[in-house]
Amino acid sequence: MDNATVIAAFAPHGPLVIDKTLNRFDGIFGKVPRYVVDFVLSQKVDPANPVPGLQEAVSFFKQYHLEPTHKEFAKRTIRTRGTFPLLGKLSVRYDQAKDTYLAHVAAIDDQNVRVVPAVLAQYDHMLMTSGAWGVMHIAFSSNGSSSPFIVTKFSPVQVTRIDEVVWNDARRQFTDDDWMDLLITTVGINPATLSARQKMLYICRLLPYVESGLHLAEVGPTETAKTYSYRELSSYAHVISGGTSTVASLFYNKTSKRLGLLGQKDVVCFDEITTPDIKMGADVVNVLKDMMNDGRFSRDTIEFTTDCSLVFVGNTRPDTMETFDSMPMSIRHDRAFIDRICGFIPGWEMPRIRPDNYATSIGLMTDYFAEVMHRLRQTSYLPTVTKYVSLPGWSQRNSRAVSRIVAGLLKLLHPNAPTDGVAPSAMAALVETAIGLRSSVVDYLTVLDPTSFGGTKYEYAIDGIERPKTKVKVRAKVATNQPSKVL
């Protein structure tokens, strides 16, 4: 991948690219998401002379970003000074009982901060959907309200708007291999250290960002960037780390009358799903099954819809290759639940993250890429998949899972496919990748219920040319006390 091509394709349209070698300095900026760091570095660092800009960025984060343990100090500072700027995430909701807009300011752990109309007029969409990181000026105003704090100014440190024409035109300037390398570099990894198979698996981790209702699972060794892929790349994703999730937090809180995470985010990742003491109650699992099937769930007499995609990730021993065996009992023996997972990523194939496989070239700003992926969710590529690919004799759920995976891969790797078309060989590679992910799910289900799931065939045709049965060869143990088998 040529840096000059990346700069020529994107740099003229705004601060969209960044030298990813700066990733190695993550530790000096505190606990701030990667997409926020990228934005600040793009504004302050000159790649030709990075040291002054890095020093300025360090000072910026030190001055404006306070750790959660400093929330009381921050409140006192606002109270004594009258106003104070803070860097953090701002989310706004409408309180219909009070007919007012209230913000959640994580920096001071306050759910009832008021917001001046001027801030909402400029940033209402981003603040009232996913929320946004930025520098907010918080003033103190004692007027007997539920909170004396009020946001008077807000400057986002995220990309807030994108031009799809720029993205599509830029893609045409790259070969297929160079475009994939650009996406791998953008997530912070040096593509030169990966095999072609590993590159594709990295791309597969991004599928839930671009395709609604595409649910994945991945288990593998520690330090392979499983959680990083969903915590650091986008504000539209949320990671639930261990603990017990509730119906109220995930779906709908009847007391506060607020949608849970699945109604707010594009992607929700259940992390540490293989931890022995993790429990998922039957009430949560049952509602999740409804939601994973068609994007609908009910609470009492109210029905909700969501296009959220779910990801289940967990660690296994380095010498162990399992699919769903190490997950909670409430999941791993529930055939209906497992069947709703579109594909399984074999995490044991992914390399451990080390300094020598960090990105070393120009990539896209993380938040710009996140906004592109969020926008891609709004367009269906399934008609393009149907146009090129035939899946004769497949069950509805298997066909839908593979088609969604292929549609997501098209969005990421061939975004111009609906207008420009895609080569049959390129489409075949995507279909075989999708079948590999789905077949791991089906093989596990076959162990649980050979009568219902056994004998699945994976023939497909592209443009009327028949292809032989294909499965990606990876070794995995598919059920407890079952021998390893070739998938």
Image (cartoon, rainbow, N blue to C red):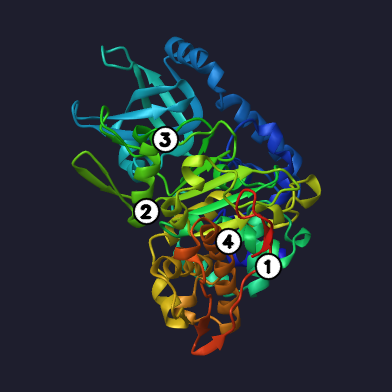
Q: Nearer the viewer, residue 101 or 434?
A: 434
- Say what secondary structure mark 4 lies in: helix
Q: Is residue 472 above or below residue 52?
A: below
Circle on res. 281:
3
Quarter of the image where the N terminus is located? bottom right
The residue that appears at 21% across and 38% down in the rendered structure is 300
Binning the other alpha carbons within 10 Å of mark 1 as few (below 14), some (14 to 19) or many (20 upward) gives: few
The residue that appears at 74% across and 49% down in the rendered structure is 21
Residue designated by label 1: 473
Precedes in sequence: disc 4 or disc 3: 3
The residue that appears at 37% across and 53% down in the rendered structure is 307
Quarter of the image where the C terminus is located? bottom right
Position of 351 with respect to 180 (left or right) is right
Q: Nearer the viewer, residue 281 or 30?
A: 281
Whole-percent x and y of residue 190?
74, 56
Circle on res. 440:
4
The residue that appears at 36% across and 37% down in the rendered structure is 283
Residue designated by label 2: 307
Q: Rounded to the nearest whole Å, what is the CA distance between mark 2 and mark 4?
A: 24 Å
Precedes in sequence: disc 1 or disc 4: 4
Precedes in sequence: disc 2 or disc 1: 2
